[in-house]
Image (cartoon, grey):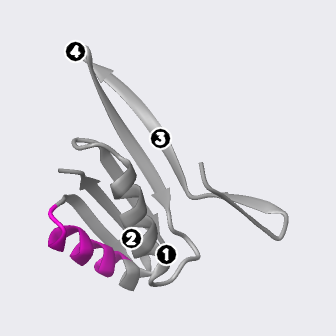
Amino acid sequence: MDLLICASKPITFYSVKINVVDGIISKSYDLNCNRLVCPLPVARTKKKLNEIESGDILEVTGDFSESGENIKRYVEKHGDKVLEFKIEGEDYYIKIKKL
């Protein structure tokens, strides 16, 4: 897990959940891009997508809506699938399936 120490408070960038349904293991990763502006959210999303396996889910959240739009464009352009995309004010949420 990547950690950044900022003003003596650790910030977690991602976590993973492992689900077992009918004997099939699937993994879902959370990537927190709060307080980051472009190009960092896109770069972190790209890095995490390169690390996870086909079929895994990556959920990205952040608080700079323009970064959310950029991540969505990157994912669609590079062949993975955006399952869900929401923007509320400056906050964004993207659910991506690695293909």
Q: Residue at left 22%, top 41%?
A: 55
Label 4 with label 2: CB-CB less than 8 Å: no
Labels 4, 1: front one: 4
Lower position in the chain sequence, tag 4 or tag 2: 4
Magenta-drawn stretch, dominant element (helix, strand or loop): helix
Q: Secondary structure at mark 3?
A: strand
Q: Mark 4: give few (<14), some (14-19) or many (20+) Cα within 10 Å.
A: few
Disc marking residue 39: none
Amino acid carrying label 2: it is Tyr
Disc marking residue 92: 2
Q: Residue at left 46%, top 67%?
A: 44
The residues colored magenta run 68-79
Check residue 73 for magenta coloring: yes
Lower position in the chain sequence, tag 1 or tag 3: 3
Lower position in the chain sequence, tag 4 or tag 1: 4
Label 1 with label 2: CB-CB less than 8 Å: yes
* Marks 4/1: CA–CA distance: 36 Å
Amino acid carrying label 3: it is Val
Q: Residue at left 23%, top 68%?
A: 75
Check residue 2 for magenta coloring: no
* Marks 3/4: CA–CA distance: 20 Å
Q: Is residue 16 left or right of residue 95?
A: right
Lower position in the chain sequence, tag 2 or tag 3: 3
